[in-house]
Image (cartoon, grey):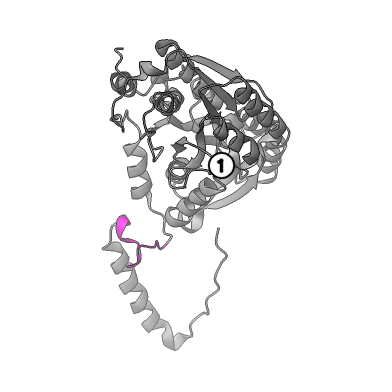
Amino acid sequence: MRGETRKPVPGRRGTAVLAVVILVAVLAVGCRGADEKRADDGSSSGACDLHHVTEQIDDHRGIADWAYPGEPFDAKKAAGKTIFTIQENSTNPFTSTIVAGMKDVAGLIGIQLVDYPNQGQRTQWIQGIQQAISQKVGVIVLLGGTIGPIYFREQAAAANRAGIPIVTVVDRDLTQEAEQGTAARVGQPYAEAARLDADWIIKQTQCRANVLVLTSNELIAGDINSKAAQNEFDRYCGEGCTTRFVNIPLSEWATKIGTTTQTEVTSNPALNYVFPLYDAMAQFAVPAIQLGGGITRVKVATFNGTPGILRMIQTGDTVEMIVGENEAHLGYAAMDQAMRLMSGVDPLGSGDYGIPLRIFDDSNVAETGIPPEYGVGYGRQWRDGFLKAWGLSG
């Protein structure tokens, strides 16, 4: 990641002085812990820091505590109303699993949920918005990192004039502002997840990572997770790590992820990890690793935790780790915002539902079910907390 800096070779007369300087420097470094390898301004020296990355991984192995972040309300006031969902692409297993969680809640409350089918084309999203307006639904929920009012401002304004609020789900990182034209949102910890994946790779390779990072910077959040991953490698992996970032738009995943991955596997014998920013990309990367002859040396670490990709950990050795988030939890959070709006209750302004990230590997992936199921592997505290806040029992 950094070019070599050539230094002049000292002459004989400076050898003794140089030896003293080196000895002092070595002793100084040896007296510092890994966490003390940073400059006074908080920046990092960029040295290999296995202590830091191991600590981050250990902190995310178990089931995290969770508490409902808002004030309770009577969700039954939303019964009989309609929520209209539009996924960024109906074939995306990640957003489809979020919708499945929403349907669970809709059944409990007595809400009609209409999921608009599409293949990820913006013209289809516009048609969906228009259909929702004509049906006079209660709320429109947009699901995915690439779909939002930014691409159909006129239609979003028309929905607003019709009194139909728009809720976005995982379109932006929690550190970013909500999109204009939205009434509420469920934010996403994109950057945090990317750092955890980088931490895993750094630890597993002992700061000798050679990584192909597959990105999709068309997200409305931009390349915030790409930058977070690169920054983590820069800060904690030291000079022994190499990264190559390749951006592949969502519409080209099926055609380009495989060829990009296979080419890198065959042309780069030092490659030891493929890091797709989203686990749905792994379905195209894993076969390419096999075809490229990298099955014994190249592993995959990724993010989201959709059941089908978690299953790859259980049945094979290529997908080694996933930073999982509870997609059912995201679905409940989306319903919470929508039901608040339909019940006349203020939405959660921050859009931060404190959805925990959990690292899954061979040691704990069985906790997600065999085969994995959505919403499993994260305990029951999150679900019980929502139901209590809504005035329901489990």
The one nearer the camera, 373 or 5, is: 373
Spot occupied by residue 221 in the image (x, y as percentages of width and height): 54, 45
Spot occupied by residue 289 in the image (x, y as percentages of width and height): 64, 33
> Is residue 192 among the parts visible in the rendering?
yes
Spot occupied by residue 213 in the image (x, y as percentages of width and height): 58, 44
The answer to which image quadrant residue 350 occupies is top left
Q: Is residue 121 left or right of residue 163?
A: right
Residue at position x 63%, y 22% from top?
134
Which residues make up the magenta segment? 34-45
Work out which quarter of the rendered image holds the C terminus and state it. top left
Residue at position x 60%, y 23% from top?
132
In the image, farthest residue toward the left = 31
Residue at position x 34%, y 20% from top?
383
- Residue 40 is inside the magenta segment: yes
Q: Which residue is mark 1?
A: 272
Position of 165 relative to 316 (above/below)? below
> Is residue 147 among the parts visible in the rendering?
no
The answer to which image quadrant residue 73 occupies is top left
Work out which quarter of the rendered image holds the N terminus and state it. bottom right
Q: How many marks?
A: 1
Position of 346 relative to 238 (above/below)? above
Residue type marked 1: Asn
SS for callout 1: loop
- Residue 306 is inside the magenta segment: no
Position of 135 relative to 11 (above/below)? above
Spot occupied by residue 15 in the image (x, y as percentages of width and height): 42, 82
The one nearer the camera, 189 or 205, is: 189
Q: Is residue 5 left or right of residue 338?
A: right
Determine crowd level at label 1: few under 14, some 14-19, many 20+ residues with C-alpha closer than 10 A: many
SS majority, magenta: loop
